[in-house]
Image: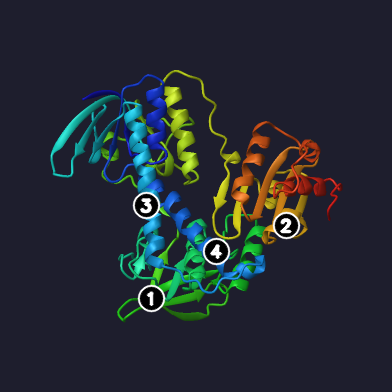
């Protein structure tokens, strides 16, 4: 019952931290109240990508003639798409279980609560309570869908992302509230397989409102052309679920005009809330702010020996961020000297179609930070690989410091750009300059050439525009 480290939560922060700790020679236990792998593997990152792939394949089939292929008929089987998604998630969860066994990590099933003296009390599924002690405890309990005052999730007519991945029947009409990554991904999936989708976004910028405005504008044009209605700068005033379906009352925040939207299902995709209730934080005096645990750059809380990582600490609620935080945290515990995480070099990826990926400063953000900048843009309409693939939507936009050539930021929209953004992350980590990107030979024909071409455009040297 005595461990070097106990990790509470087995998501991409928790299980990665546990495995790294085991590699460093610690005796490790992980407490998980639900499925191993957490939300990411079971209800988030992985199964959603399986659904999006199904939608993409269906979309390819619908446009087969564009590639010189005749297909007599095609139909989206909603149930089988959902089933495939669950199979992929289950397989990944089993993979993490294998890694736990390989690394001799003890898995404890139940709900954990902190107690004085670096103790963890676990309530098992049958109600039995067991007590464990550790020299170090990492909180990695993740987050859940945020509830809005006028949008109470009931799991039937007003649903969250988990239910959206396991509906028994495909809705004919859906309203998606929130146009961030979760909202636009589900909007794309359901629209592609035949659901009539309306997206309501509170912020004026519209789709993916935290991205560079040029990206939001481009994705908005593409969604509009596809037939997805987007209501930006709009609030949800109420949802009437008394009838067979739902009636959403929406209000334009600029002119005050109200509209009623009828649908079968409302998907709440307006962000997440940290899972920090019932952990015993208040009893131990662990400091929080609006539910988020306050930590230093190595994820120490104000109580020695207790740490927090992932979606329950301030910062981007992203799986790869949680994993990086977990590794840094345990390496510091083990006496190593890891670098603090550079939160300005975290890639953000949205897996709708076309995909969106970004890292670093937006154009306006760079100006606000006081930089004199050079901006380069290269459209995929000028890319031979994109044209050949039938994927000419979108562009690459890069931002450099005019004085020193520092790579300040990059913003991509297009096919497979989530696979391309890592080049910029590494370039920024290595302090690569704009001219070095221009002179680095990129393979032809590839989508990644657009990064070189955009960099060349920033310096007035672009060839293919």
Q: Quadrant of the C terminus?
A: bottom right
Sequence order check, earlier mark of 2 and 3: 3
Query: How far is disc 2 from disc 1 in space, using C-alphas?
Result: 37 Å
> Would you say residue 274 is visible in this rendering?
no
Mark 3, residue position: 87
Residue under label 1, please give it: 264
Q: Is residue 80 left or right of residue 180?
A: left
Q: Is residue 332 visible?
A: yes
Q: Is residue 223 left or right of residue 113?
A: right
Q: Which mark is residue 380?
A: 2
| Residue position marked by numbered label 4 in the rendering | 203
Q: CA distance from mark 2 to mark 3?
A: 35 Å
* Image position, residue 6 (x, y; %): 30, 29
What residue do we see at 72% from left, 54% from top?
385
Q: Is label 2 or label 3 in front?
A: 3
The residue at the point 55 percent across, 26 percent down is 339
């Amino acid at each position: 019952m005595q461990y070097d480290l106990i990790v509470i939560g087995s998501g991409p922060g928790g299980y990665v931290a546990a495995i790294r700790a085991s590699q460093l020679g610690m005796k490790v236990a992980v407490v998980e109240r639900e499925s191993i792998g957490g939300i990411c593997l079971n209800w988030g990152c992985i199964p959603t990508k399986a659904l999006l792939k199904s939608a993409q394949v269906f979309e390819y089939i619908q446009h087969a003639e564009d590639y010189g292929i005749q297909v007599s008929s095609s139909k989206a089987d909603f149930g089988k798409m959902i089933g495939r998604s669950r199979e992929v998630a289950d397989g990944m969860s089993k993979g993490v279980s294998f890694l736990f066994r390989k690394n001799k990590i003890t898995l404890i099933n139940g709900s954990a609560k902190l107690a004085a003296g670096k103790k963890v009390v676990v309530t098992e599924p049958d109600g039995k309570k067991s007590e464990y002690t550790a020299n170090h405890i990492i909180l990695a309990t993740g987050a859940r869908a945020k509830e809005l005052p006028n949008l109470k999730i009931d799991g039937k007519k007003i649903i969250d992302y988990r239910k959206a991945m396991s509906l028994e029947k495909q809705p004919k009409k859906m309203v998606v509230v929130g146009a961030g990554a979760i909202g636009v991904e589900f909007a794309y999936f359901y629209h592609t397989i035949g659901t009539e989708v309306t997206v309501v976004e509170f912020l004026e910028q519209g789709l993916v409102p935290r991205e560079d405005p040029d990206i939001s504008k481009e994705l908005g044009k593409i969604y509009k052309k596809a037939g997805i209605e987007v209501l930006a700068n709009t609030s949800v005033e109420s949802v009437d679920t008394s009838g067979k379906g739902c009636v959403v009352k929406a209000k334009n925040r600029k002119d005050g005009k109200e509209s009623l939207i009828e649908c079968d299902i409302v998907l709440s995709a307006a962000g997440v809330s940290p899972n920090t209730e019932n952990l015993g934080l208040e009893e131990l005096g662990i400091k929080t702010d609006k539910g988020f645990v306050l930590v230093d750059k190595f994820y120490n809380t104000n109580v020695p020996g207790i740490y927090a990582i992932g979606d329950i600490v301030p910062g981007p609620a992203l799986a790869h961020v949680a994993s990086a935080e977990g590794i840094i945290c345990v390496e510091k515990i083990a006496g190593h000297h890891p670098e603090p995480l550079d939160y300005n070099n975290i890639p953000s990826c949205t897996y709708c179609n076309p995909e969106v990926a970004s890292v670093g400063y937006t154009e306006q953000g760079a100006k606000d930070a006081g930089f004199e900048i050079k901006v380069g843009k290269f459209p995929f309409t000028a890319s031979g690989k994109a044209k050949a693939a039938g994927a000419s939507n979108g562009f690459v936009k890069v931002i450099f410091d005019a004085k020193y050539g520092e790579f300040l930021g990059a913003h991509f929209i297009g096919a497979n750009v989530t696979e391309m953004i890592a080049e910029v992350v590494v370039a920024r980590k290595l302090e690569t300059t704009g001219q070095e990107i221009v002179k680095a030979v990129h393979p032809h024909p590839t989508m990644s050439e657009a990064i070189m071409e955009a960099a060349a455009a920033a310096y007035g040297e672009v060839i293919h525009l």
